[in-house]
Amino acid sequence: MKKFFREFKEFAVKGNVVDMAVGVVIGGAFGKIVTSLVGDVIMPAIGLLTGKINLAALSFVVKGSGGSEDVSIAYGAFLQNVVDFLIVALCIFLAVKLLNRLKRKKEEAPPAAPVPSAEEILLTEIRDLLKEKE
């Protein structure tokens, strides 16, 4: 049993697992922010532009046949979720693009000149002395 807990501890405290957990928590919080932005800011603004129509409340009702209940299809809520998704996808795309640009700049930086070894320094001095004698 101790071996099991030791293996679990090693797994749980690995950098990748912790980084992933932080990403999930921040992603969840970011999702709430985007949902609020879309539901409370963007969709009402679109509603104003479209004649004060509440897009999130758009739906149509399909009448039930044979005495069954009517079915409401809320396509406005679907549109709102599509806008949520597009905003999150755009933010992730921009973040990945920024990280790739930073990574590319780091790779493009000229490598530092290698420090010559003691043997190379000695051979260079010998070569220079031989040139002076000629």
Image (cartoon, rainbow, N blue to C red):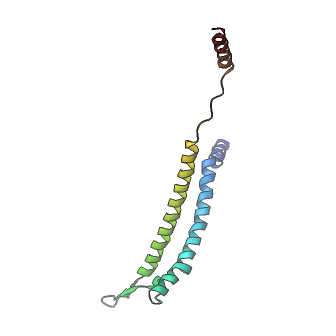
Q: Is residue 48 left or right of residue 59?
A: right
Q: Quadrant of residue 26?
A: bottom right
At a point 52% along the width and 60% down the height, the residue shown is: 94
Q: Observer-nearest residue: 75 or 51?
A: 51
At a point 44% along the width and 81% down the height, the residue shown is: 76
At a point 69% along the width and 19% down the height, the residue shown is: 118
Q: Quadrant of residue 59?
A: bottom left
Which residue is most to the left? Answer: 66
Q: Quadrant of residue 58?
A: bottom left
Instruction: Tell me where residue 84 appears, x and y as whole percent.
Output: 50, 71
Instruction: Tell me where residue 44 appears, x and y as whole percent.
Output: 52, 83
Compared to 126, does 91 lie above or below?
below
Count of numbered labels shown in the rendering:
0
Compared to 73, does 29 lie above or below?
above
At a point 65% along the width and 15% down the height, the residue shown is: 128
Instruction: Tell me where residue 16 appears, x and y as whole percent.
Output: 60, 49
Which residue is most to the top? Answer: 133
Compared to 43, does 92 lie above or below?
above
Task: Give the position of the C terminus as an image quadrant.
Answer: top right
Q: Is residue 41 left or right of residue 120?
A: left
Compared to 71, does 99 lie above or below?
above
Q: Observer-nearest residue: 80 or 117?
A: 117
Q: Observer-nearest residue: 129 or 76?
A: 129
Task: Give the position of the N terminus as an image quadrant.
Answer: top right
Instruction: Tell me where residue 85 appears, x and y as whole percent.
Output: 48, 68
